Structures are given as structure tokens and as C-alpha cells.
């Protein structure tokens, strides 16, 4: 992984680019009043697509990893993510495709 050097007041510290990105995400979330979950959660993934997929093809791995990376979830282990549910619906040709994540504390 590449690192960058951050200088402040004459001192230098190597900062991982992943850490810089994580901090930026966290600051944006705090600004919007979003706080991290500190208890177990249930996550619902709702997919709106022009073409429906097989039920076993819907995956949330990248999305949940992103929630951890952004600091919204402490970890994606069963201790913190206890349930994941999926649903999907077909959109009309002129409607945008989207994926909606709903996170609820258990």
C-alpha cells in the first residue's frame, strides 16, 4: 500500500492513504450528524434493477466492507452484523438503478 507524508509544524508522519480516506469519510458523516453503530445491527439490501437477478446472486460483501471502512460499523463479524436480508424489484426503463441499504440496531 502506498503511503504519503503529512507535515505539520516541522514534524513528519507517514499516513496510510487508506487512513486518510477513512478520516475523510468519517468527517463527512459526522458533519451530516451520522454516528457509528456501537451495537449489533441488521442490514437490509434492496436492489432496484432493470433486470432482476437470481436470489443467490445478490451480494452485500462490498457494501458492508465499505460501511466498516467508512467507520459506520466497528466490524463485519457476526458479533456486529447479525442479520443480512435481501430484496429486489424491477425498475422501468427510464428509472435509475440503485441499491438501498437500511441498517437497524438490534
Image (spheres, grey):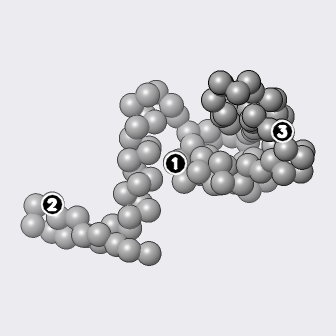
Label disc, if present, on residue 70 of the rendered structure: 1
Task: State which tag comes first along the sequence, 2 or 1.
Answer: 2
Residue 79 shows in the view: no
Residue at 74% in and 35% down: 49
Task: State which tag comes first along the sequence, 1 or 3.
Answer: 3
Q: Which residue is mark 3?
A: 52
For the N terminus, the quadrant is bottom left
Task: State which tag comes first along the sequence, 2 or 3.
Answer: 2
For the C terminus, the quadrant is top right
Marks 2 and 1, how far apart in space? Answer: 25 Å
Q: Nearer the viewer, mark 1 or mark 3?
A: 3
Q: Nearer the viewer, mark 2 or mark 1?
A: 1
Residue 54 versus residue 40: which sits nearer the camera?
54
Q: Are marks 2 and 3 in contact (CB under 8 Å)?
A: no
Q: Are marks 1 and 3 in contact (CB under 8 Å)?
A: no
Q: Find residue 21 and report its horizontal and vertical position in percent.
A: 41, 54
Q: Which residue is mark 2?
A: 8
Asked if residue 11 lies left or right of residue 96, the reply is: left
Residue 91 in which image quadrant? top right
Helix or strand or loop: what does disc 1 sit on?
A: loop
Residue at 15% in and 68% down: 11
Residue 75 in which image quadrant? bottom right
Q: Find residue 25 and report its horizontal and vertical position in percent.
A: 44, 45
Marks 1 and 3, how far apart in space? Answer: 29 Å
Q: Are marks 2 and 1 in contact (CB under 8 Å)?
A: no
Q: Residue furthest left?
A: 10
Amino acid at each position: 500500500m502506498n503511503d504519503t507524508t503529512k507535515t505539520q509544524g516541522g514534524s513528519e508522519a507517514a499516513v496510510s492513504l487508506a487512513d486518510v480516506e477513512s478520516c475523510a469519510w468519517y468527517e463527512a458523516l459526522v458533519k451530516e450528524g451520522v454516528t457509528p453503530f456501537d451495537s449489533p445491527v441488521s442490514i437490509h439490501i434492496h436492489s432496484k434493477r432493470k433486470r432482476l437477478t437470481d436470489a443467490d446472486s445478490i451480494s452485500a460483501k462490498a457494501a458492508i466492507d465499505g460501511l466498516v471502512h467508512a467507520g459506520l460499523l466497528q466490524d463485519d463479524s457476526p458479533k456486529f452484523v447479525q442479520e443480512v436480508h435481501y430484496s429486489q424489484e424491477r425498475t422501468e426503463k427510464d428509472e435509475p438503478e440503485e441499491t438501498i441499504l437500511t441498517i437497524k440496531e438490534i
